[in-house]
Amino acid sequence: MSSITIYHNPKCGTSRNTLALIRNTGEEPRVVLYLETPPGRAELLGLIAAMGLAVRDVLRKKGTPYEQLDLDNARWSDEDLVDFMLQHPILINRPIVVTPLGTRLCRPSEVVLDILPQPQRGAFTKEDGEPVVDATGRRVNTVAC
C-alpha cells in the first residue's frame, strides 16, 4: 500500500495535475474521492492541523455554496465551519496530499513536489501547458525576472 494519500476531485484540473505529479514518481497513491467518501470530523480536523492552516484557509469558495451560506461572516466559529464542510464536502479545498514528509493543500499543484518522498522520473507539463518538471526530473523555475 502506498504511503501517499490524495483527497481528490477528478473534475478539478489542479487535483488531476497533482495526482499526475505523484504518479510521475512511480508511486500509485491511495486516492480518496472525498466528495463520494468525505472524511469524518476527526479526520478532517487532523488534516487541517497537519497542514498548519486555519480552518477558513481550507474552505473552497468557487463552485460551492460558500456565498449562499454566508461563510465569510465572522460569526461562524471554526467548529461551525467544520460542520459546514462535513455537510457540504465540496467546501473542502483540494487537493490535500498526505505523505511521510508532510501534509499540504496542493494549490498550485506543484506544491506536492515539496512533500514527495521519491523524485520525479521525467518531464511533466500541466494540463494547461505549463511545464513543471524537465526531462531530468528537476523542477522548472517559471518565476519571471
Image (cartoon, helix red, strand yellow):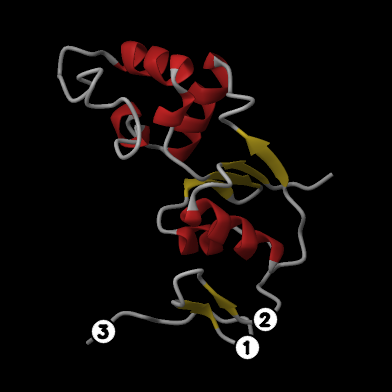
Q: Which sits in the foreground, 54 or 125?
A: 125
Residue position marked by numbered label 2 in the rendering: 122
Whether residue 91 sits left or right of residue 101 in the image: it is left
Dot 1 and dot 3 residues touching (CB under 8 Å): no
Q: Quadrant of residue 49?
A: top left
First of labels 2, 1 by sequence position: 2
* Residue 84 % position (x, y): 38, 16
The residue tagged 3 is 144
- Residue at 44%, 71% (x, y): give it: 128
Which element carries disc 2, helix, strand or loop?
loop
- Image spot of residue 41 (x, y percent): 52, 15
Q: Residue furthest left?
A: 74
Name the amino acid type tagged 3: Ala
For image coordinates 77% across by 54% down, the residue present is 28
**Considering only order in the chain, which callout, 2 or 3, is on the residue closer to the N terminus?**
2
Label 3: state its secondary structure: loop
Real-space Cα separation, disc 1 to disc 3, in angstroms = 21 Å
Kindly check if marks 2 and 1 are in contact, taking CB atoms under 8 A apart as contact. yes
In the rendered view, does 106 fall on the left or right side of 144? Answer: right
Q: Report the Cα–Cα distance between label 2 and label 1.
A: 5 Å
Q: In the image, what residue type sits under mark 2? A: Gly
Which image quarter holds the C terminus?
A: bottom left
Identity of the residue drawn at 67% across and 71% down: 119
Residue 141, relative to residue 54: is it above or below? below
Secondary structure of the residue carrying numbered label 1: loop
- Identity of the residue drawn at 49% across and 46% down: 104
Q: Residues within 10 Å of mark 3 (few under 14, many from 20)?
A: few
Q: Earlier in the sequence, mark 1 or mark 3?
A: 1
- The residue that disc 1 covers is 135
